[in-house]
Amino acid sequence: MSGVTIMIKQISVTFGSQSVLDKILNDHPDRELALFSPSINATSLQLVDYSGKESVFSAPVIYNVVSHTGNDDWNHYIDYVEVTPDAQRRKVLDATVSNFMTDINHPEGMYSAYYMTSNDNADKRIFLTLWKDKYSFLQWKDNKINNFMAFNNFKDDFSINYHNSGYERVEK
């Protein structure tokens, strides 16, 4: 099936030291895995399994893919925004993300985006974006017209549990 992209159904991540995650990488050379380092002040690394298959991690964080847009390139910078909105805000957010995902004009420097739910909490929404570099992401993040996932959109609701984190690819 040349030229056909099949959307993966899940992305799994785990965290740990370089030596622990290197062992997983070495034990699963045929798996689509990518090692990332936090872009700010964190000590543990993140290993992402984007194969769409059942996780090989002993303590995975599993995200169920709702929608995807773009052409993946896992070799640079990724950014996560996680929120747990109430039912009303969830409907608005889902509609806004749906519009973004179907728009063919992606932000400059963005390869692709995933909209996901948490395997542990179906109300949690995760917006994962893959970028050419951190600078491209920051340009989009600072553009209030385009960034519907910005903290300022949620800062009035302390129950939403907003979390944002960026990671840069660790070269092997």
Image (cartoon, rainbow, N blue to C red):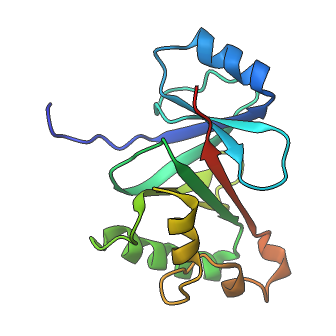
Which residue sits furthest left? 2
Residue 119 shows in this picture: yes
Where 62 sits versus 164, above or below? above
**Hey, which quadrant is residue 86 in on the image?**
bottom right
Residue placed most toward the observer, 71 or 39 = 39
Residue placed most toward the observer, 118 or 48 = 48
Where 141 sits versus 118, above or below? below
**Hey, which quadrant is residue 102 in on the image?**
bottom left
Q: Quadrant of the C terminus?
A: top right
Where 131 sits versus 27, above or below? below
Number of marks in the image? 0
Residue 58 shows in this picture: no
Residue placed most toward the observer, 76 or 61 = 76
x, y percent for residue 65: 49, 49
Residue that appears at 58% across and 76% down: 141
x, y percent for residue 129: 51, 58
Q: In which quarter of the image is the N terminus?
A: top left
